[in-house]
Image (cartoon, grey):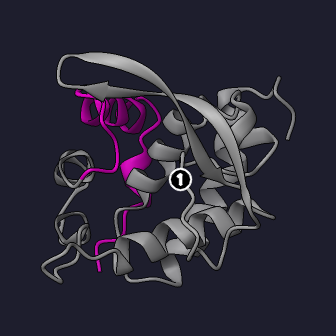
Amino acid sequence: MSVGTSQEQFLDLIIPQAITACSDDSFKIVSLLISQACLESGWNKSSLGYKYNNLLGRKWVASNIIASGFVSLQTKEWVTDHYVTIYSKFCKYASIADCFKDYLWLLHNTKLKNGTLRYQRVLDSKDYIEATQAIRDCGYATSPTYPTSLRTIINKYNLNQYDRKD
């Protein structure tokens, strides 16, 4: 997908893939996945997205079995009361489907030192309001405005229509 793609074209590309990924999984808040892909990739304008299929800003760890390696790029992280610029290793993926699969693996398998699932609150969320707050509270993103930014995207594009109620 080219950098000049519109937001609507980007949504047309990722929505079916997000629905498929979540239908193969127990995760029901599809709008969270879609909105994070939009926000984290800058609507696929960041090289991490369009070059490496990493639409979710997923950081690389050596034990990752889905990623096809990593790329080191600059990123901004919120620390206490301001942003700092650092270099981090980010996953490279063969496809967007692999990126989504890895994200869902992360939600279901990342454990804290005490053995509990790090993203259990996200998995237990009843709706996108809870999920957008939980994903930040659980440490996926550092920006204090992350939940609000995700909700803005969800509301503007009516993405909660894709959330499963079952």
Toward which corner of the image does residue 72 lie, by quadrant? top right
**Quarter the N terminus occupies:** top right
Residue 157: % across, % down? 47, 35
Which residue is at 68% across, 68% downward? 67
Q: Which residues are magenta?
A: 139-166
Residue 105: % across, % down? 47, 76
* Residue sitting at the far top: 82
Q: Is residue 27 visible?
A: no
Q: Is residue 141 magenta?
A: yes
Would residue 152 appear left or right of 93 to someone viewing this image? left
Whether residue 132 is situated above or below residue 5 in the rendered picture: below
Would residue 72 appear left or right of 125 to someone viewing this image? right
Whether residue 115 is situated above or below residue 160 in the rendered picture: below
Mark 1 highlights which residue?
A: 58
User: Tag 1, which secondary structure?
Assistant: loop
Which residue is at 38% across, 52% downward? 32
Which residue is at 41% across, 41% downward? 158
- Identify residue type, mark 1: Arg
